[in-house]
Image (cartoon, grey):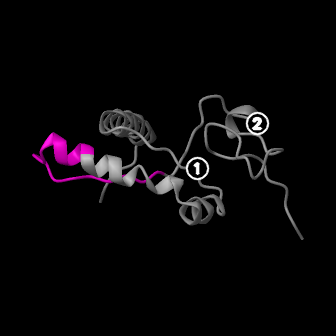
Amino acid sequence: MSLPALGVTCGRRNPQLPDVPTMQEAMNPGFVLEAWFGLWAPAGTPPEIVRRLNAGVGTLPAAADFRAKLSSDGSEIVVATPEEFAAYVKSEAVKWERIVRDSGAKVD
């Protein structure tokens, strides 16, 4: 038995599932839940080293085998500058802090 997909949780339709709406389209405007990964360097790492690391890592998506491996499970590759990634991480922290606070969840 197979079940139909109700929606994808990312902010835009997945190219591998073009007929499956996003959760925002299907039922909940503003609902976006994405898994993401990033690379951090220790605090105080010189900006030039950060730029060089970012430039090196930024070449990975051009490798066909890397792109194929990630896209095979529906992942989308996004390369960002260190500043763009820092802003994204900050926005995610703000979003999830509010969600956890509003939920009333407590750590025991």
Foreground tag (2 vs 1): 1
Residue 49 coordinates in the image, percent (x, y):
18, 48
Q: Is mark 2 on a helix, strand or loop?
A: helix
Could you tell whether 22 is left or right of 83 in the image? right
Residue 77 coordinates in the image, percent (x, y):
53, 49
Q: Which of marks 2 and 1 is nearer the N terminus?
A: 2
Residue 18 coordinates in the image, percent (x, y):
80, 45
What predominant SS class does the magenta segment belong to?
loop
Q: Is mark 1 on a helix, strand or loop?
A: loop
> Disc 1 residue type?
Glu
The answer to which quarter of the image holds residue 9 is: top right
In the displayed structure, would residue 61 be above or below residue 26? below
Which numbered dot is residue 76? 1
In the displayed structure, would residue 68 be above or below residue 19? below
Mark 2 vs mark 1, CA separation in Å? 21 Å
Q: Which residue is drawn at the image coordinates 61% and 37% (left, top)?
A: 11
